[in-house]
Amino acid sequence: MVENESNSEKGHITEQPITLHNWYHHVNWLSTTLILIVPIFGCIAIPFTPLKLPTAIWAIIYYFWTGLGITAGYHRLWSHRSYEAGLPLRVFLACAGGGSVQGSIRFWSAKHRAHHRWTDTVKDPYSVRKGLIYSHLMWMVLKQNPKEKGRTDISDLNHDPVVVWQHKNYVSFILVFGILFPMLVAGFGWGDWKGGLLYSGVLRFFFVQQATFCVNSLAHWLGDQPFDDRNSPRDHVITALVTLGEGYHNFHHEFPSDYRNAIQWWQYDPTKWSIWVWKQLGLASNLKQFRANEIEKGRVQQLQKKVDQKRARLDWGTPLEELPVISWDDFVSDAQSGKALIAIAGVIHDVTRFIKDHPGGRTLISSGIGKDATALFNGGVYNHSNAAHNLLSSMRVGVIRGGGEVEIWRGRGMKRQDVTDV
Ligand SMILES: [Zn+2]
Ligand SMILES: [Zn+2]
C-alpha cells in the first residue's frame, strides 16, 4: 500500500534509473523465472542427468511440435489471421503453443500486433532500436512502462473460445504441456522420467523460447532488405533455420497477412509447409497470399531506390542547366587560342587532359578540336561506346548558343539524363 503510494508519487518504476537498491523492483519476476531462472536450473542439472537416445529424439520432435504452436498458431493464425483453422487444429495449436512457455495466445498476439503496428518506435514492445539484447530478452526481464504501451485491437481474439479458454487456464497449460506431457511420454515410453522432465521438458522449452526470441532480435538485425529498408526487419536463411521458417522477416513485415514467410519453394519454411498440409487434410482453410504482382512491385521499387542511391553518388558531369552558354565564334576562337575544345551535339567539351589517353589515338581526337564533331563521335569515324558517352559528359564545359537542339532542351528544363539517353 505504502509502496503503491510512493510509486504513484515518483511515477512508474521504469521512469527511475536502475540502482543497486531498486533493481529488483525493475525485474518482471514471473517472466524472468520462466525464461531464465528455470532454464538455468535445467542447465545445472545436465551433468547429473544422462541423455538417452529415445529422450533426445522425443525432445527434438516435441521441440518442432511446440515450435509450430508458436509459429503456425500464435503467430500466423492468431496474430495475423493469415489462414483459418477449425476447432481441432486450434485446440492442438493452443496446447502446443502453451507447451513452449511464452505466455498465453492473448498476451503474445497483443504484443506482436503492437510490434507490427509500431515497429522500431518506443511503442514497439521489443524494438531492436533499444538494442539487440533488449529485443531478444530484456524486454521481458525488465518491466515495461505502461505509458509506452502500444495499443492494438484484439477483439477478434476475445471472441475465439479457444483463446479465452487458454488464457484463463494458462498456468495449467504450462504445467501440463510444458512439463508433464513430455515427461510422461518419456517416463511411460522408456522409463526415463528424469530425462523426460529435463530434456524434453525444461531444456526443450528453453530452446523454443530462444528460437522465437531470435525472430524479435536476429530477424531485425541480420540479413537483406529486399522489400523495404525504412525499418529494421531483414531476411536471412540462418534466422529461418533457427525459427521454423520465420526468418524471411522483411517480407513478413511487408505482407504480414500472407501465410508464407518464404515465397520461393526452395526456401526453408516448415511452418508454411505444415499449414499447407493441414489444408490438404481439411483442418485449415482460406490460406491468404498476396498476389505475385504486388510482391514484385515492392521488390522492384526497393531495387530502384538502391540504383538511384548509387547513381547519386557518381559524377555524371556538370548538369546542362548549369553550363554557360557560349557563342559559336567564341568557341572557335577559344579553340584556336590553344584550348582543346570539341563541340558534340551542341555541347562544348574540354578534352585537354584526355587527348593523350584517347583509345583511338591523339590524331583523331585532335582533328575535332574547334569543330562540331557530332557526326564523327556518333559513328562518322567510330560509333562510341556507352562508357565513352559517359566519359564525354564528365568533360562538358559549355553549351553553344543557338548551336543545336541542346539549348532548346535546356530552355525546357530537361535533365541531363534525358540528354544522355538521347
Ligand atoms: Zn518483426
Ligand atoms: Zn508477425
Image: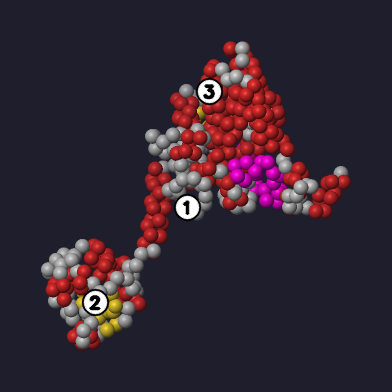
**Observer-nearest of 2 and 44:** 44
Tag 3, which secondary structure?
A: helix
**Residue 299: in sight, yes or no?**
yes
Image vertical order of residue 9 relative to residue 87, above or below: below
Closer to the observer: label 2 or label 3?
A: 2
Q: Amino acid at mark 2?
A: Thr
Closer to the observer: label 2 or label 1?
A: 2
Mark 1 or mark 3, earlier in chain: 3
| Quadrant housing residue 331 | bottom left
Q: Which residue is mark 1?
A: 229
Mark 2 or mark 3, earlier in chain: 3
The CA distance from mark 1 to mark 3 is 36 Å
Crowding at mark 3 (Cα within 10 Å: few <14, some 14-19, many 20+): some
Crowding at mark 1 (Cα within 10 Å: few <14, some 14-19, many 20+): some
The CA distance from mark 2 to mark 1 is 43 Å
The C terminus lies in quadrant: bottom left
Q: Which residue is mark 3?
A: 61
Relative placement, left or right, of 56 versus 148 is left
